[in-house]
Amino acid sequence: MVITQDELAARRSCIGASDAGIILGLSPWKSPADLWHDKVYGCTFKGNAATRRGNLFEPLVIQQFEEWGVINGLGDPTVVVPDVRYERCWTTKNGTVVPFRANTDGVVVTEGCHPKQYDRYLYGECVPQTVVEAKTARSIDHWGLPGTSDVPDTYLVQTCVQMWCSGAEHAYIPVQSGFDFYVYSVPRPDEVKLEEIIETCAEWWAAHVTTKTKPDGPPASVAVLTTIPRTEGSSIALDESVHATIMEWERTKRQRQLLVAKERELKQQLLAALDNAEMGELPQGFLTYLANRKGHRTLKWEDNPRWNTTE
């Protein structure tokens, strides 16, 4: 589903399917503290190369999945209604009602469904048998065998929440990786396991977002912390322990400046040693200063694998 700024604003009021993996500490891109800041202060993320690539290729991934579905017996034709949203609430043990929202990339229309019923899927009125979560990936080295549910944990939890919100019994994750296309299949887990995921996420929301209490653990990333709205002219008293962090920060900045200057000096000496050549040879390896397709040159050292460092 293409994520607009309006959609980002709406997501502040609920737990999204993609939030679940973050809350459980499974996301490699975002921490629970980052998510807390997004929910409390608002998300200022405007997208990056990966999200733009995902938005661009998502319709193509869905189209390829429909073709895959025909070949693999999902239906002829296999029809996916794109961008279907489902909402559901969970009540925690202490009585807090927590809203969940699943923005699926699509749902597979039940075989024999009349075209006039498509709108019922689109508006989340029909319970789908299958939800679809399209992905693009640079590599699937960290994924398991296609056709299985061996997918990154954060995506597995995401589809579990989608199935819980929608009532679906199955989820497919079609993945475009370069010129290759794969499909992963995730069955609905047993209800006890599914409700454990929902309860854990809801308890986190009740304990931290509802009360605006920061979660334990490392603070949010610098990218998130720099976007917090600041009150002009405001001031707070810092804990005395912060002074040690300030001093270490100042020392680190000075060390970095010295290292950058030293690196520049050494690079100058190496470029001078190369004269007008693109490569310099030593028994231990090769020093190169080669241009890429755009004409930008990079100074690199490559070890000679045949050189015996013990001699």
Image (cartoon, grey):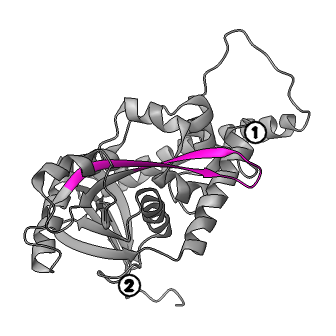
Extreme residue in the right direction:
240
Q: Nearer the viewer, residue 169 or 13?
A: 169
- In the rendered structure, does residue 98 fall within the stretch colored magenta? yes
188 versus 154 height, above or below: below
Taking the spot 47% from the left edge, 54% from the top edge, the residue there is: 17
* Left/right of residue 193 with respect to residue 265 in the rendered view: right
* Left/right of residue 79 with respect to residue 210 in the rendered view: left
Write down the residue under mark 1.
Answer: 213
Sequence-first tag of 2 and 1: 1
- In the rendered structure, does residue 31 fall within the stretch colored magenta? no
Q: Quadrant of residue 195?
A: bottom right
Q: Secondary structure at mark 1?
A: loop
Q: Position of residue 203 (x, y in %)?
A: 70, 53
Task: Say whether marks 2 and 1 touch (CB < 8 Å).
Answer: no
Q: Which mark is residue 138?
A: none
Q: Position of residue 277 (x, y in %)?
A: 23, 58
Report the magenta residues as a range.
81-102
170 versus 58 height, above or below: below
Amino acid type at mark 1: Thr
Task: Nearest to the eye among marks 2 and 1: give it.
Answer: 1
Amino acid type at mark 2: Pro
Q: Position of residue 295 (x, y in %)?
A: 18, 47
267 versus 28 height, above or below: above
Write down the residue under mark 2.
Answer: 305
Taking the spot 54% from the left edge, 36% from the top edge, the residue there is: 13
Q: Nearer the viewer, residue 146 or 267?
A: 146
